Image: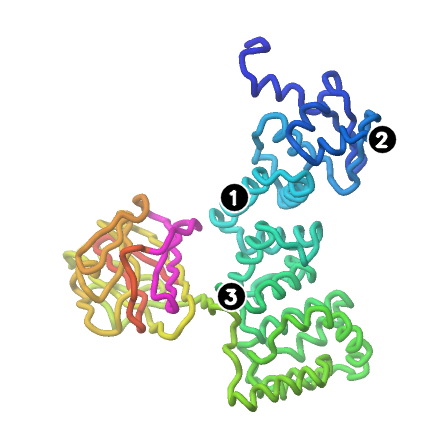
């Protein structure tokens, strides 16, 4: 066992929250008392320096209180102040927000930057982003308010914007978190995944759930999901029950309605579904109708740069002759006999129009090598490796990208079970890939992609690739 003096970092860790070596008690929000050394704390934080050596009562007492900082966050702050290190394994969705708030209070920008980078890696590197990002944003807004402006709120807002709200359970994103999301993205040019009608529907039902389950039920019936909006709807409930809660919902919505752009909702949906609800002020509806009448159109249905998540199938009519389709055309397989070299297959939908289009592909069984990417509407030879052709752009399990027989290194080699997300930006005409949840930059060699493209795969025996 090494004695004291062998490591400065280890010796300083012995001082953290140690009542023997400390001359200051720190009382936190949850009334837990921690211990610190005045000199070290003051030397590491200007805020603490002013608090502890300003000649006021705090500088004369051996106790200081922080009624808005929890002990779990203060322990991490102390570790950083003493050692310049952070134990990230101790983080949870709750205490990381508290720690960031405490780092902001003590004006520790280096620690704030480290926390933002940690959260970014967590959101980019796992499959729980759809739950984690809304939860963290809700916690951040609860702790720092919906109007707070900092890099963490910005990061969380960007990630929640990439999730279609109709897939987020009510309660996973708080009403205050939703308000933060909508206010910070109202005029955004960044990617956004949710059509404005769905934003409106999600917001109204979220507000109704604050009143009662019955209230949310009444509004769910009156606001059909976008996929069912053309179906006929009947309301068998007592209209008087609806009227009892309508004014309450209107009041709850008043703070968030300015951040919902009704001009992006089809005029017939406004007139037939939204206006009869009686929860939108008449002047707001009139302004929307005037805009649409004057412009003879609605705005684009999604704010910012539209983000489209596609559920695709392989096209049985556009494939190499030896490729076999399974599982309702979601799987393409290259049989172990009867084929030499790579054959290609195209998906069943063409991509055109501005926005970001994303789809998922799984390499269920790789080969030498399995490739995924995009191709043009015409010109693809289905019996020749796609990467050799001028009309295709593909990433292979070798980790290389190929177009027109020119290869470039992109990621490390990957194998069976790898999940790939293709990010095709038809506004900027660029493409990027995520591998097992980790997103990589745009492929720098591929610029000015064509305006009409199809998802494509290229494989040889014994390859098997799932789409969607």
Task: Name the one closer to the observer, 255 or 211.
Answer: 255
Q: CA distance from mark 1 to mark 2?
A: 38 Å
The answer to whether mark 3 and mark 2 are in CB contact below 8 A is no
Foreground label between 3 and 2: 2
User: Position of 430 compared to 195: left or right?
Assistant: left
Mark identifier at residue 117: 1
In the picture shown, does residue 169 fall above or below 195? above
Mark identifier at residue 359: none
Find disc 3 in the rendering and name its residue. Answer: 192
Query: Residue 199 appears at what percent x and percent y?
Result: 60, 71
The answer to whether mark 1 and mark 3 are in CB contact below 8 A is no
Query: Residue 295 appears at what percent x and percent y?
Result: 52, 88
Earlier residue among tags 1 and 3? 1
Q: Is residue 335 magenta?
A: no
The quadrant of the rendering that contains the C terminus is bottom left
User: Position of 83 compared to 208: left or right?
Assistant: left
Find disc 2 in the rendering and name its residue. Answer: 57
Query: Residue 106 appears at what percent x and percent y?
Result: 68, 38
Question: How many neighbours does mark 3 have within 10 angstroms: few (below 14), some (14-19), or many (20 or more)?
Answer: many
User: Position of 416 compared to 292: left or right?
Assistant: left
Residue ID at (80%, 28%): 59
Residue ID at (26%, 67%): 375
Earlier residue among tags 1 and 2? 2
The region drawn magenta spans 416-442
In the picture shown, does residue 1 fall above or below 333? above
């Amino acid at each position: 066992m090494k004695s004291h003096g062998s490591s400065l970092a280890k010796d300083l860790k012995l001082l953290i929250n140690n009542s023997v070596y400390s001359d200051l008690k720190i009382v936190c929000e949850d009334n837990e008392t921690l211990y610190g050394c005045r000199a070290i704390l003051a030397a590491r934080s200007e805020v603490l320096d002013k608090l502890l050596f300003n000649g006021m009562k705090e500088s004369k007492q051996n106790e200081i209180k922080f009624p808005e900082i929890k002990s779990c966050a203060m322990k991490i702050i102390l570790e950083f102040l003493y050692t310049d290190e952070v134990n990230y394994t101790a983080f949870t969705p709750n205490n990381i927000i508290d720690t960031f708030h405490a780092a902001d209070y003590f004006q520790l920008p280096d620690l704030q930057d480290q926390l933002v980078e940690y959260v970014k890696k967590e959101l980019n590197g796992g499959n729980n982003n759809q739950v984690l990002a809304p939860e963290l944003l809700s916690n951040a807004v609860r702790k720092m308010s919906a109007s707070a402006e900092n890099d963490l709120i910005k990061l969380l807002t960007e990630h929640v914007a990439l999730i279609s709200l109709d897939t987020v359970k009510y309660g996973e994103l708080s009403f205050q978190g939703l308000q933060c999301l909508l206010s910070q993205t109202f005029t955004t040019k960044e990617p956004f995944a949710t059509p404005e009608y769905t934003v409106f529907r999600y917001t109204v039902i979220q507000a109704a759930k604050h009143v009662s389950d019955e209230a949310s039920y009444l509004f769910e019936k009156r606001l059909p999901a976008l996929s069912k909006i053309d179906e006929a709807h009947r309301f068998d409930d007592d209209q008087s029950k609806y009227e009892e809660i309508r004014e309450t919902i209107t009041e709850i919505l008043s703070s968030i309605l300015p951040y919902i752009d009704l001009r992006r909702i089809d005029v017939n949906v406004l007139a037939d579904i939204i206006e009869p609800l009686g929860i939108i002020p008449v002047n707001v509806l009139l302004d929307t109708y005037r805009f649409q009448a004057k412009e003879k159109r609605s705005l684009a249905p999604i704010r910012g740069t539209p983000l489209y998540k596609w559920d695709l199938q392989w096209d049985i009519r556009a494939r190499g002759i030896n490729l076999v389709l399974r599982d309702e055309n979601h799987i393409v397989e290259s049989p172990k006999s009867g084929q030499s070299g790579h054959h290609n297959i195209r998906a069943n939908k063409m991509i055109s129009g501005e926005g970001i289009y994303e789809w998922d592909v799984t390499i269920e069984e790789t080969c030498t090598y399995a490739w995924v990417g995009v191709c043009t509407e015409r010109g693809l030879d289905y019996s020749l490796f796609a990467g050799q052709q001028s009309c295709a752009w593909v990433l292979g399990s070798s980790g290389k990208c190929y177009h027109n027989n020119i290869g470039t290194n992109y990621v490390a080699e990957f194998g069976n079970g790898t999940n790939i997300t293709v990010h095709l930006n038809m506004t900027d005409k660029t493409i990027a890939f995520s591998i097992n949840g980790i997103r990589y930059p745009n492929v720098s060699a591929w610029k000015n992609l064509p305006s009409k493209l199809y998802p494509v795969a290229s494989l040889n025996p014994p390859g098997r690739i799932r789409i969607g």
